[in-house]
Amino acid sequence: MRPRSLDEVVGQRHLLGPGTPLRRLVESEAPMSLFLWGPPGTGKTTLAYVVAGVTKRRFVEVSAVSAGVKDVRAAIDAARRELGMTGRQTVLFVDEVHRFNKAQQDALLPAVENRWVTFIGATTENPFFSVISPLLSRSLLLTLESLSDDDIREVLRRAVADERGLGGRATLDPQALDHLVRLAGGDARRSLTYLEAAALLADDITVEVVEKAVDKAAVRYDRQGDQHYDVISAFIKSMRGSDADAALHYLARMIEAGEDPRFIARRIVIFASEDVGMADPTCLQTAVAVAQAVQLIGLPEAQINLAHAVIHCALAPKSNAVVKAIGAAVGDVRRGLIGQVPGHLRDAHYPGAAKLGHGADYKYPHDFDHGLVRQDYAPEQIRQRRYYEPTTHGAEAPVADRWARIRDFLRGT
């Protein structure tokens, strides 16, 4: 089912439109060097094959897992001979190029710089961390995105009907199709592998057939329906209740059902401030780091990072003082409790501000003991309002004591 032209490629629309580098590479005869960076099963190898096939270039694939410097140089020498004798260009495709060490990557430089080959490197890892700068700077970096559910459905439907696939010899139940889409997790190759395994067992492919073929029970989970909201609700409430085991269970259910890991990570980041807050300020740091890790690594490895954040959030001391504080402040603003900014706090940098009295009598806190000085900061209408009311849980306890003493000092109580 590998596409034979760019028009047959499913997904990656941002890379395949008119005027894009891939289109230019296919439509012109000039050599070009590319890095294709994206999750597994998003079409990196497919695009390399399409480029070679459509342009009638010779295609040579080198695996970074098993090839050494000698293999790289041999492939380049063969490409130079072919170019010199017949004028035919070569696409040198290096899969998992991030596994090449510096010496192996250095061996590619002359071929890329002199355009002896059209070099295409595929990687699932950030090339800015794994590819040497001279090679990266001489190549275009194209980022591939995980395929959407609709993309995977299109891949599976084609495979059922196309003569290169099942050729209509099997039928795919709609629920089985949904299950295959969930199992694929945006990976087209995985979806086709599971479909093929199911088709070997029966011509009428049902959910039960898919479960038997891939030895994986169907997780009843509709990302647009009740299960989506019920599971994420139970997930949040389990972390809030400090039950790490239950939270990990719901995390596993979402991952196995094919939930977007970025959605899970976003919910954890929100939770870190909403339900933990200042009781453990490092919880937000962990949550944000995990959200970045999910973007950088992707599933399945990122499930370890997600579990790390879930355990941290679940076992951290809890405080909802932060969310209550901003909620109370926003509520007052919406009720019209706004007032004028005190004159001594107004911007005094523009011409004429001094004549208006802006910034007059402002006291610079760093000039005073402990960096504190008594002066009015809030508008008069809310001067006695209290928003942040810290708990005595975890790391928020010393914060509560310090804030109480600062507040009393500033307000003269």
Image (spheres, helix red, strand yellow):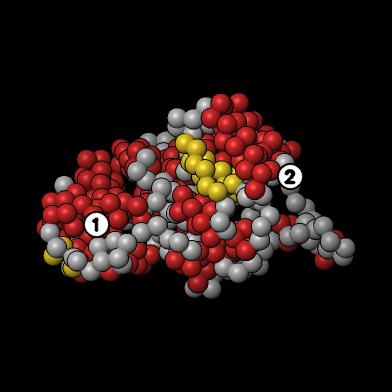
Is 163 in front, or is 180? Answer: 163
In the image, which is nearer the foreground, mark 1 or mark 2?
1
Residue shown at 77% from the left, 53% from the top: 361
**In this rendering, would 308 be left or right of 353?**
left
Residue 235 vertical placement versus 101 (above, below): below
Residue shown at 17% from the left, 54% from the top: 200
Which residue is denoted by mark 1 in the rendering?
Answer: 195
Is 38 in front, or is 342? Answer: 38
Is 302 in front, or is 47? Answer: 47
Q: Around disc 1, counting alpha carbons within 10 Å, would you say few (fewer than 14), some (14 to 19), or many (20 or more)?
A: many
Residue shown at 41% from the left, 48% from the top: 40
**Residue 132 place in picture, x, y as percent:** 63, 34
Is 45 in front, or is 263? Answer: 45
**Residue 323 place in picture, x, y as percent:** 42, 55
Which residue is denoted by mark 2 in the rendering?
Answer: 364
Residue 287 visible somewhere in the drawing: no
N-terminal-most mark, 1 or 2: 1
Q: Amino acid at mark 2?
A: Tyr
Q: How many marks?
A: 2
Q: Amino acid at mark 1?
A: Leu
Look at the numbered disc 1 and give the secondary structure of its residue: helix
Residue shown at 48% from the left, 63% from the top: 5
**Residue 413 place in picture, x, y as percent:** 54, 47
Instruction: Tell me the quadrant of the picture where the N terminus can be found.
Output: bottom left
**In this rendering, would 266 be left or right of 120?**
left
Q: CA distance from mark 1 to mark 2?
A: 70 Å
Look at the numbered disc 2 and give the secondary structure of its residue: loop
Q: Around disc 2, counting alpha carbons within 10 Å, would you say few (fewer than 14), some (14 to 19), or many (20 or more)?
A: few
**In this rendering, would 220 be left or right of 77?**
left
